[in-house]
Image: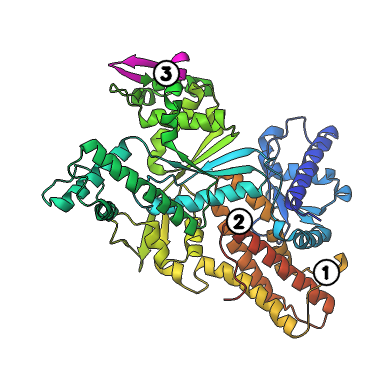
Amino acid sequence: MNCSNLVQNAVSEVKTLVENAFNKAMEQGKLPQGEIPAFVVEIPADTTHGDFATNAAMVSARAFRQAPAKIAAALMECFDIDNAKWIAKAETAGPGFINFTLKADWFTQAVQGILADGENYGRSDYGKGEKVMVEFVSANPTGPMHMGNARGGAIGDGLASALEWSGHTVEREFYINDAGNQIEKFGLSLEARYLQIFDENHPMIEEGYQGEDIKEHAKAFADIHGDSFVGKSHEERKQALIDYALPLNIAALRRDLGKYKIEYDTWFHESVLHEDGSVMKTVELLKERGLAYEKDGAVWYKNTEMMKRLAEKSGKPLTEKEEAELKDDVLVRANGFPTYFAADIAYHYNKFAVRGFNRVINVWGADHHGHVARIKGAMDAVGLDGDKLDIVLMQLVRLLRDGQPCKMSKRSGKAITLTDLLEEIPIDAARFFFNMREPNSTLDFDLDLAVEQTRQNPVYYVQYAHARICSIEKNLAAEGISPRSCTAEELALLTAAEERELIRRLAAFPNEIIQAAKSYDPARLTRYTTDVATLFHKFYDACRIKGDNEALMQARLNLALAARTTLKNALTLLKISAPVSM
């Protein structure tokens, strides 16, 4: 049995009941002829009066020129509840809301389905195999990963997992910026630190990389080569230092991300796009399409024209202020070197046109906000569809200790690194905490709370719920009681409010994954695990599992195991461990 669509099936049935009732009411003259407005069907915060509710009558007042309560009454007369598969009854509430109550069989099948699906519970075919790339972190390889990268890693990996579980074909990618100005600055910084070893008065370059890691690389290079590169040319010395340090930094990124439980399908080097001519081919393509021109010895992209075109196409022309702020972008400098923007266009062209991804999702820091419209517009400019490129903008992280903002790192300059964090905070806590808020919200990361082994620590709270269920099963086994499959009649004994509430939330898991994938918000899943843990504790405190009624005991044990399965799968998706004891 697969219960992946039970919530969606019930929602769909309610929508059909409502739409059919509207049509019947119009046919019978109970409502005037009109177009049925869009309405929602949702699980209400308070399920005392129903498992699902709709605002259909409320939003129809203008269309049918009647009070919502009167519309609701007309619909009630036209519902075909007797032939419904999942819905037992409908009732009106308040000024026009309509509540629907599920049949007991829905709850029974939910528990049976979860246990039957086991480790696959939550997976669906919603995405129909759509080929999606998620590019995230893509930290500058000139230094260690900072806190923004750490948050981006948890968000990107969680989103990729949600897409996989919801039936998409997903690839994770790290884009290595191993070409351009930052590598030049990296080489110059290394060179300066290397020369300072032999001449303490040698100056550091202006705005060079100041981290201790640059000094460490220079010293290690000197330990190997001594002063043999002091007398060599500037270019040879700089390139030798880059060739030595850059692979070490990339290896460190792989190592640190691996420790963070992130494994990429592809590590894509920007330098390849320059070496194989892709960047200049993209520039020529823009010229051919009339969207690039030469001026002052440089090649420019007609960003202003493209943004105007797209605004007119969308039906939302630019304001005078927006138009005044637009400017064209340099693709190739007068010295013949392509800009980062040119390489970025070529990279995204490669994703779509060369490697054939249907959709591409980039997780970027919020400081890249101004680049979003440009790169999406550039995709249209090269003949692709910019709407298939989605950008998740991620806000900053603020570390707190004793309720106050704090700094942790002493050895890596001003940057707080992922390594620093994971030396102090468990990996499970880091991944959970970074996914506790939607990406576009600033995140306060409480270092004290992250290491607490109390119910106040959300990841501990969720993991404890899983371990508690394992302990319940173990203790019952010690008394000779083992779980067994229950009949539908036995599971129908689960009628307590706490039992029904838990089952309803467990059944929502596949839909929560789909919604996380659709909204690009894996934080939905950390919130979901907290909900399930809370409802399980509530159920366990109110409904004693061990008892004289063997059928009810087994039904409740089955429900506990369904909760454990759901928690484990949710944590597995987020790459957080599900301990059996704590």
**What residue would you read off at disc 2?**
573
Instruction: Residue type at mark 3: give it.
Output: Glu
Name the residue rendered at 57%, 33% in the picture.
355
Residue 365 occupies quadrant: top left
**558 lies left or right of 518:** right
Q: x, y (%) of residue 166?
A: 66, 47
Secondary structure type for disc 3 = helix
Instruction: Residue type at mark 2: give it.
Output: Leu
In the rendered structure, which disc, 2 or 3, sits on the residue that comes first in sequence? 3
Front disc: 1 or 3: 1
Q: What's the distance in space between the residues labelled 1 and 3, CA to CA?
A: 66 Å
| Marker disc for residue 485 | 1
**What residue would you read off at disc 3?**
305
**33 lies left or right of 327:** right
Comparing 528 with 497, the one in front is 528
Q: x, y (%) of residue 10?
A: 77, 50
Which residue, as the protein is rendered here, is positioned at the far left?
201
In the rendered structure, which disc, 2 or 1, sits on the residue that comes first in sequence? 1
Q: What's the distance in space between the residues labelled 2 and 1, CA to CA?
A: 26 Å
Residue 74 in view in this figure? no
